[in-house]
Amino acid sequence: MAGRGGVIRDHTHHHHQHWDGVVPPESQPATSILRLNAHLHWEPAREPLHADIDSKKVCGLGPGMSFANAVKERVGKIGLVPCAVGGTAIKEWARGEHLYENMVKRARESVKDGGEIKGLLWYQGESDTSTQHDADAYHENMVRLIENVRHDLALPSLPIIQVAICSGEEKYLEKVREVQLGMKVPNVVCVDAKGLELKDDHLHLTTKAQVQLGQMLADAYLKHFGSAEANSHPAL
């Protein structure tokens, strides 16, 4: 979810990376789209949305802005609350762990002056394709994460849109995808990233693919959860 679209290796130092700065029209900033920054202040949202959140890595374009632009006509003002850290396994998002607690803290902070949490976008799982144990535990871990976050935010039917991953260790990739695509939890829907274009690292989506994924997430949101949009101001 943090996004590595447009992050390229420097030719001189191969272990150095930088973002190419390319922002397609679908991902451009808009006055109605804000972002809760790392210091818990609202500011105009722009890619890379996770630059100060996933701060140990080079962030590029993710699906967030293309998602927000695609839903903004229907929902009015949008507050994005980026919380992702790339390369993390689902067990690092257990209740009590730093990543989980930070996500809940940021989500609560986002609505303290009004607004409403309208949904959670979840794109994760590549790190859980390395071993049979992790792949087997993915379903239980994901269900627990959903239960925890709904309980801790006091939103029992919080909409969740999950991405079925398209890369990872081939050995257990299909096992994790099967869990994601077959999740039978109310108000949890899944969009499939399979077939979207990958970068040369065969792991991360290209900028173009991230834009497409954002639009797929938006379509899923509007189709499954968009009918209740009467004058509300969501924090997505």
Image (cartoon, rainbow, N blue to C red):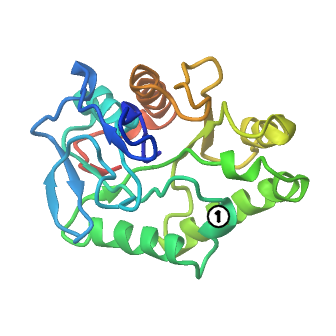
Q: Is residue 178 left or right of residue 168?
A: right
Q: Is residue 152 above or below residue 146?
A: below
Q: Looking at the image, which residue is at 37% across and 49% down? A: 58
Q: How many marks?
A: 1
Q: Is residue 92 above or below residue 73?
A: below
Q: Looking at the image, which residue is at 36% across and 55% down? A: 82
* Residue 5, position as x, y percentages in the image: 40, 32
Count neighbours of disc 1 (C-alpha within 10 A) and say few if under 14, some if 14 to 19, many if 20 or more.
Answer: some
* Residue 70, position as x, y percentages in the image: 31, 26
* Residue 219, position as x, y percentages in the image: 45, 25
Q: Secondary structure at mark 1?
A: helix
Q: Looking at the image, which residue is at 67% across and 60% down? A: 90
Give amino acid for label 1. Answer: Leu
Q: Nearer the viewer, residue 179 or 232?
A: 179
Q: Is residue 74 left or right of residue 2?
A: left
Q: Looking at the image, which residue is at 49% across and 64% down? A: 155
For this orientation, the residue located farthest to the bottom is 96
State the residue position of label 1.
145
